[in-house]
Image (spheres, coloured by chain):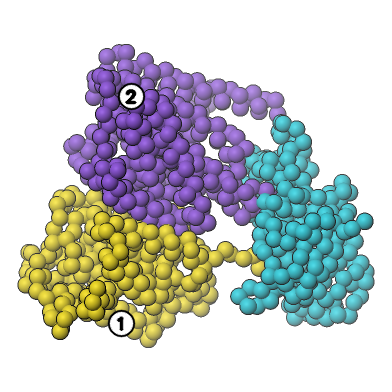
Chain colours: A yellow, B purple, C cyan
Amino acid sequence: MDAADFVNLLVSALLLAGIYAAMSVGMTIIYGVMKIVNLAHAGFLMLGAYYVLELHERLNIDPLVGSVLAFPVFLLAGMLVHWTLVKRIPVSDQPTLASLLLMFGLWLVLQNIGYLIWGSSDRSILTSRTLSSMHLGPITIPTVRVIVFIPAVCSLGLLEFVLRKTWYGRAVRALMQNRYAGRLAGIPVEKMARLTFGVGIGFAGAAGGLLAQLYSFSPDFGHGFLLRSFVIIVLGGLESFWGAAAGALVLALVETFSILVLPAGYQPAIAFSLLVLALVLLPGGIAGIFAKKHRWA
Amino acid sequence: MRAASTQMGRFLNYRVAGWGTLLIVLGILPWFGISSNLTRLLFTALVWIIASVAWNLLGGVTGQVSFGFAVFYGLGAYAAAMGINGGLHPLAAFTISGLVAALASIFIGLPTFRLRGPYFAIATIGVSEAVRVVMTNLSFTGGASGYRIAEHGRFRPLEHYYTALGFSAVAVVISAWIHESKFGLSLQAVREDEEAAADIGVNPLKAKLMVHLLAATLTGIAGGVYARYAAYIHPQGVFGFHTSVAILLMPIIGGAGTVAGPVIGGFVYGLVQEELVAAFPQFHLLLYGALLIVIILFEPRGVTGWLGRLRGFIERIWRKSATASVG
Amino acid sequence: MPPLLSVERLTKYFAGLAALKDVSFEVEEGQICGLIGPNGAGKTTLFSIIAGSVSPSSGTITYSGKDVTRWKSFQAVRAGVARTHQITRPFRSMTTRQNVEIGLHFGRGPASGSTWGEVAEILEGVGLGRVADRPAASLCVGDQKRLELARTLAAKPKLLLCDEVCSGLTETEMNEVLDLLRRIRGRGTTILYVEHNMRAIMSTCDQVVVLNFGEKLTEGPPLKIQNDPAVIEAYLGKTAAD
């Protein structure tokens, strides 16, 4: 491998990391505030993809604009899901099996509604950008990757800004650290949870739209990305956005560079193995979330 | 106290009688000239029941929700397939299915049982998907194109049917025994509060590993029985995520943590799925997803819970009308 | 005769903070040894280390002449050291009887093959006979405290670690529980007893160890402790602040 190849791989890993980070951030925020492992994330990624596809095909709306338009729609959908389903299960400081299975049931429903509406064949979004590429000296980059990378990173920056500078953001961060103290400090926990769930789903929908411009998809879309999202937030310590960004980078690097040592067929196994390794080998290592609860005096 | 124990004894007898009747009915059913299609449906349901009852031991009784039972089902299927092609007697091949799955359960359980609840569940998704990818690429099992069983002699559906019936009876007996035994008590204690269980002498890791091993063995056998019947298996099928999902949904919908629940769940799933899959391929999972949501929100004991409520309701009406007639 | 339990220079850090510093003491067989101290003194940490649910940063624990510093909790129970929890942790969906049965089976074992009578006896002993077949989740606070104790007793400990069994109980209930502890000791069980309630400690213990900020302040018989100026400052000073 010469230097140009290496730089090529590095650049594509970085571009991939951006979209991975945007993809997992919705899951991170829901986990952080509500301690819910959102398996339905995959379903909303898929719906986001079809939403952007339909806008593109029917109304001729550019998929990038479509992805941005997905955010408010999915935000409302998320709040509706919270209002109808999620708030009915007991809150807990630890993730519970009930919430996990509830979200899993929702994923099954969404996925199969997808099959009923769109059938099982693979779809993709084709624009003039899809096949073009950019050349920077010896480096070749598919244009669409760059174009998708930019809104992904912008949205992360925007979220970071909201979390740092607004009342909502400070409340979210307070709840992530200590739900009980947050309630004592007068944060309306239920309202915040609903809004947060909406934001998380909003990000999932938008990220689904972005991903749809890079990969073909079917109603089972999101399955592989769901597990990748897990890897990312587990690597990132589950509750921090910077951690998730770092996790996204690690996963993207490992996946991209593994083509040098692993046969292509085994590629998908990387994320899955990394997930198990991260869960088992980093207990409490990064953020200590599944460190055993010590019994204090 | 004496009254209580005889009452308990009578209750047990009723249950044994109920299960016995079910077994006999299923046993003599094929003699009444049922269609080959119905035999196929019942066979499928029985195989699912084995896996469903097995999952319930780990997921329902012990509270460790696994999305990874396709690993055991698939390994069992491949082990039996290769054993039969190697000239083994089917029962010997099924034994190997069980052993291979049991071995895998230890390799998977040792690291993942360090994780609690949802983390364990997620880790099992990872394990299961990784195994599927590996199996899709392994050349000696035929990779993605699958593996064919070449068994000599005529295809005898009833032989398959009775094999499945026999193993599902064994699974139910094991499940009933666990629900009554001191081992079962320790599993329930682990489900309720792992640390408190350790504080009165239960070794939680050992309990979980043992029940995982037992459940894996049964699931592996189910996979083997299915493989011999199907005569052709492939990784996307037996190792597929949907297989794990089916094995998880059946007991939860039937009623996790009960003896009858997983049987009901397996029966319904086996019959409904086979019929619906032909007509509306996606409809059954939509239905099961919705059912899962309803069960999590309203009735953790699933169908058995609803049956219990129905019985309570009928008993109340009965009592009311009885007192009314006396009055 | 060597002590049943001896703790030597036990130290535990949580995230760099010392919860226990160099704590040493001994418990003689047949004693009720009280362990007191203001909130956050390290009582429950010390307890958890002895019971095997937390491992210490340094120091040793010797039980019956054997080094048991880093044992696991289920090993501790089988060797005869069992604890109760300050905040009760019943197996909620199981009946009171089943809760006790688990302790009987997985502790030092039932007396005979049939456990029915023995469980009934334990339940009657703590006054839970009337709720034996109710799910543990449905018991009131006092009964849950009793169940916590019954379940632990069923494991037949030689050394019983009692964590605040009196908190949240009425005066009458408390006296019943204290009577029960004395009866348990009367059958030869050694008890290490953490308690906030000074009167409970003073009326039951033979020996009292006082912890403050993770260190041993002093130890001695209850009367001596009661009049120790250092204890009064650490303890009553806190009470006055309340």
Could you tell whether B287 is left or right of B51 in the image?
A: left
Looking at the rendered structure, the number of numbered marks drawn on it comes to: 2
SS at mark 1 in the image: helix
In the shown orientation, is residue A278 left or right of residue B269? right
Please report, as a chain letter, where disc 2 is located: B
Q: Residue at x 11, y 76 (%)?
A: A133
Query: Does the rendering let one see residue B257?
Result: no
Say which residue label 2 marks. Answer: B160
Neighbours of disc 2 within 10 Å: few (<14), some (14-19), many (20+):
some
The answer, for residue A287, to whether it is visible in the render is: yes
At label 1, the amino acid type is Gly
Q: CA distance from mark 1 to mark 2?
A: 61 Å
Task: Give the image location of residue C211, x and y in percent.
Answer: 79, 73
Name the chain letter of the residue that bears numbered label 1: A
Q: Quadrant of residue C94?
A: top right
Residue drawn at 68 percent across, 76 percent down: C18
Q: Identify the disc placed on residue A157.
A: 1
Pick the quarter of the image with the N terminus of chain A: bottom left
Find residue A32 and name its label: none
On screen, residue A110 above or below A21: above
Question: Foreground residue, A116 or C75?
Answer: C75
Q: Residue B86: percent from the left, percent from the top?
A: 34, 30
A188 vs A81, nearest the viewer: A81
Q: Is residue B209 left or right of residue B121?
A: right
Q: Secondary structure at mark 2?
A: helix
> Residue visible at 19% across and 77% down?
A146
Residue B32 quadrant? top left
